[in-house]
Each structure stands twice: as C-alpha cells, then as structure tokens.
Image: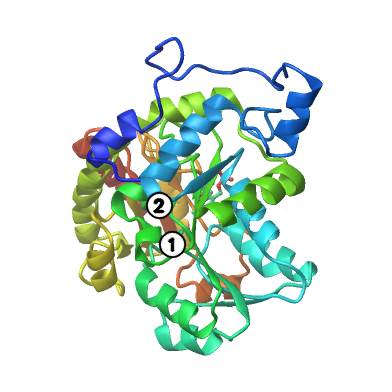
C-alpha cells in the first residue's frame, strides 16, 4: 500500500483508521473473548467466512493496530505480534520447518536464538549448518538446493557483524528456490534498514528493545507476506507457542513507537561520540561498531544502513579489567537488554551469550574481555565521563 508520508510521520500516525469514538490514543481492549450476535455468526467467524474478532489469542483490536503499524514500518503485508522476541523467533521457525529440513544460520546470534538453532531444532530432526555468513564463499558452499531457511541478524549481537542482506537473499533464492530468508532486525530497527526491501522473506524483532524503547515491555514481531504470515499466526502463534501479546503491552509499544525516530536519531548521534572516546581510551583494545572504517563489514554497513545504530561492543585488555569496569559504572546501568533511554552495559560471555561454549565464542569473533554497550539518550558527555572514571578505577591495582 502506498503511504505518502515519511518515517517520523509513520511511527506516529501509522495508517490505522480512526477508532469509533475518535480517541487519539489506542483504546486498550482488555478482553479475552468477543461476543457473537448469534451461533451462526460465531460459526462464520471460525470458518473464516466473516471478519471480526473471536478470542484474543487469535486477534485483539489493540494488538491489530500495533501489527498494522509494524507491517507498515517494515514494508510487509502482515505482522504477527508475540509476547516476546523469542516467541516470535520460535513461533516463526517451528511453523515453517519440519523434520528433515536443512537450514543455514549465522554463528553470531542472540544467545537464546543460537541455542534454539544449534541445539533445539536438531532435536526435532532439523539439520542446521551454523557458520560465519559474512564469509560469502563459506555461505555459498553451505547452501544446498533443498535448504529451507536462512537465518541471521542485521547487526549481529554482540559483535556488530553486518551481513549483506541483498547478496545473501539473491543467492539463497537462486540456488534453493522457495528458501525463506529470515532476518532479525532488532538492533537496526526498520528506520535503519528494511530487510524485506532487500529481498528477505521474513523479518523478526524483539520489540522489547528499540521499538518499545522504555524498558517496560517484553514483546516480539514477525513480519512477512500474507500467506507466510497466515501460517505463522495460525500455527506458530495460535497452536505451537500460544505466545500472544496482551493489549496493555500493545498499547505501551504503540506509545513508545511514536518517538522511535527521535530516539533513534538521538541514540545514533550519541553512539558516534561514545565510539570516538572508546577509540582513544588506552584501556580499550578493540571497538566493534559498524560505523568504523576498520570494521570488517564497513562497506556493507555503509551501503545497507541509514545510520550505524546505538550498539557498541569493546574489548578491554583483560577479563579482570572488563569485570572491574562493569562494577565501577555509576550512571550506565549494569543490565542485559538494550534499546532503552538508559545506557545499558553488560558482559556477553557470562550473560546474554553464556550458552555459547568457549569455542563457539571464539568462532563468533569475540571473547570474555568483551563488554556490550547500548547507548542511551543521556547527555553524551555524561556517558563518556562515566566510562572514563570506570576505566580508570578498573586500572587501579
Ligand atoms: N533477537 C535479538 C537480536 C535479541 O537481542 C533478543 C534479546 C531477542 C531476539 C529475544 O528477544 P526477547 O525474547 O528477549 O524479547 N536480547 C537480549 C539481550 O541482548 N539482552 O537481554 C535480552
């Protein structure tokens, strides 16, 4: 559907029709079920012969309004809301795959996604090839004519790897017709890149992060064309996971979304200043940020991303120093998750990626000296001053 407005307008207005009473904010339909006018009407709704709500695991008007806005932002036909990012990812993969299928996935993924792909899916008879997908030759060698699905993150957690979506999607579709390319766009958000427009088939999100943006909701989305969306909703959401998003959470995300553009602009601008500081800090050995010319995927990032995002990782000189620095933060908050107004800092090897073995961490290109930083919306000078004092405290014998 053509939409004549820009991104800032889109996140505020969406294209949802005015509600019946003209409320500006989305009404919260706090109901589990919907009353039928007659037994015949109930039957028609279940048979798909009449539109209308039935039961909130199958659809809810507050959640629908949010789904329409996310579909609009990602440029997809359909969006299915889940009660977490992992709900969206598992609901999507489990509804589209079956025993005997082969999938290819990147080796740098959020820890629980990595566990799902490398450990759980094989238990259900799905063969998974996990490798560094930014290595084009290795990716092409791993693809088979019967590969059913390819999975990676737009900006990978926590190494900030950026894989060329267009190149991967066109190769996957060429050698394995019908192969579904699934991209987790949590770190970039649709404001930095729209994977569907580059050839991906499905976009998944943890909306817990930037989309909601205020650290008070856990949620996820899957965005796809209609026929795939129908399967994800009617199998992955309705039957397999039942991980339905509640209307209160949907309302909060609709509210949070209104400021997505200004939040992302502010966070991306702050991140550039923090990176400048980190680059010259003597306690930091290496900075992982896709906007740095020395980043191995800088050219892809420059081509693909509107801005470089607000996630930075950096390696300290030792594990001890990394731990001490984390313990000396005064303003930056020591917590997992990301994409909030507050700057959040955490240690992937022992926290978000603790399910990776030592060898898997190495293969993914980071170490236990790595700290991951989700830049917030505080004054950049305050964030930098906090890092500086924590680094200096970490150095003291
Ligand atoms: N995808 C990505 C890229 C993520 O970073 C996360 C969570 C998920 C999916 C799962 O979403 P959830 O179920 O938590 O809504 N990432 C986290 C992180 O890095 N720290 O805490 C959670």
Instruction: Out of 336 and 181, give the one closest to the viewer.
Output: 181
Tell me, for residue 187, which label it has, or none. 2
Residue 357 percent across, percent down from the top left: 63, 69
Instruction: Out of 112 and 95, give the one closest to the viewer.
Output: 95
**Residue 119: quadrant of the picture:** bottom right
Instruction: Out of 322 and 194, give the one closest to the viewer.
Output: 194
Q: Are marks 2 and 1 in contact (CB under 8 Å)?
A: yes
Q: Is mark 2 within 8 Å of ligand 1?
A: yes
Tell me, for residue 11, which label it has, or none. none
Tell me the residue that label 1 is attached to: 156
Residue at 45% x, 43% y is: 327
Q: Secondary structure at mark 2?
A: loop
Looking at the image, residue 182 sits to the left or right of residue 129; the answer is left
**Residue 343: quadrant of the picture:** top left
Residue at 75% x, 76% y is: 100
Looking at the image, residue 34 sits to the left or right of residue 300; the answer is right
């Amino acid at each position: 559907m053509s939409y004549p407005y820009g991104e800032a307008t889109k996140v505020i207005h969406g294209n949802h029709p005015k509600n019946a009473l003209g409320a500006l904010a989305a009404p919260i339909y706090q109901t589990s079920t919907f009353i039928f006018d007659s037994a015949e009407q109930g039957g028609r709704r279940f048979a798909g012969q009449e539109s209308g709500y039935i039961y909130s695991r199958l659809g809810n008007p507050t959640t629908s309004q949010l789904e329409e806005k996310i579909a609009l932002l990602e440029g997809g036909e359909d969006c299915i809301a889940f009660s977490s990012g992992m709900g969206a990812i598992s609901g999507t993969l489990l509804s589209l795959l079956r025993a005997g299928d082969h999938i290819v996935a990147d080796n740098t993924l959020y820890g629980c996604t990595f566990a799902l792909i490398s450990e759980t899916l094989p238990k259900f008879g799905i063969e998974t090839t996990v490798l560094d997908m930014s290595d084009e030759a290795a990716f092409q060698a791993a693809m088979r004519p019967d590969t059913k699905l390819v999975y990676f993150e737009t900006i990978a957690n926590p190494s900030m790897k950026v894989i060329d979506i267009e190149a991967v999607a066109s190769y996957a579709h060429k050698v394995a017709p019908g192969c579904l390319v699934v991209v987790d766009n949590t770190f970039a958000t649709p404001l930095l890149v729209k994977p569907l427009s580059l050839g991906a088939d499905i976009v998944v999100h943890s909306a817990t992060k930037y989309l909601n943006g205020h650290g008070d909701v856990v949620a996820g989305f899957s965005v796809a064309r209609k026929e795939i969306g129908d399967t994800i909703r009617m199998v992955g959401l309705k039957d397999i996971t039942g991980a339905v998003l509640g209307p209160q959470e949907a309302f909060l995300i609709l509210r949070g979304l209104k400021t997505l553009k200004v939040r992302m602009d502010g966070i991306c601008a702050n991140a550039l200043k923090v990176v400048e500081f980190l680059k010259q800090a003597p306690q930091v050995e290496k900075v992982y940020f896709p906007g740095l010319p020395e980043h191995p995927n800088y050219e892809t990032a420059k081509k693909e991303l509107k801005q470089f995002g607000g996630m930075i990782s950096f390696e300290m000189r030792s594990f001890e120093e990394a731990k001490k620095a984390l313990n000396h933060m005064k303003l930056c908050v020591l917590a997992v998750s990301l994409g909030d107004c507050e700057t959040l800092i955490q240690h992937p090897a022992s926290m978000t990626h603790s399910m990776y073995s030592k060898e898997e961490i190495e293969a993914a290109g980071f170490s236990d000296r790595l700290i991951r930083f989700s830049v917030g919306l505080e004054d950049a000078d305050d964030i930098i001053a906090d890092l500086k004092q924590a680094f200096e405290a970490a150095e003291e014998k």
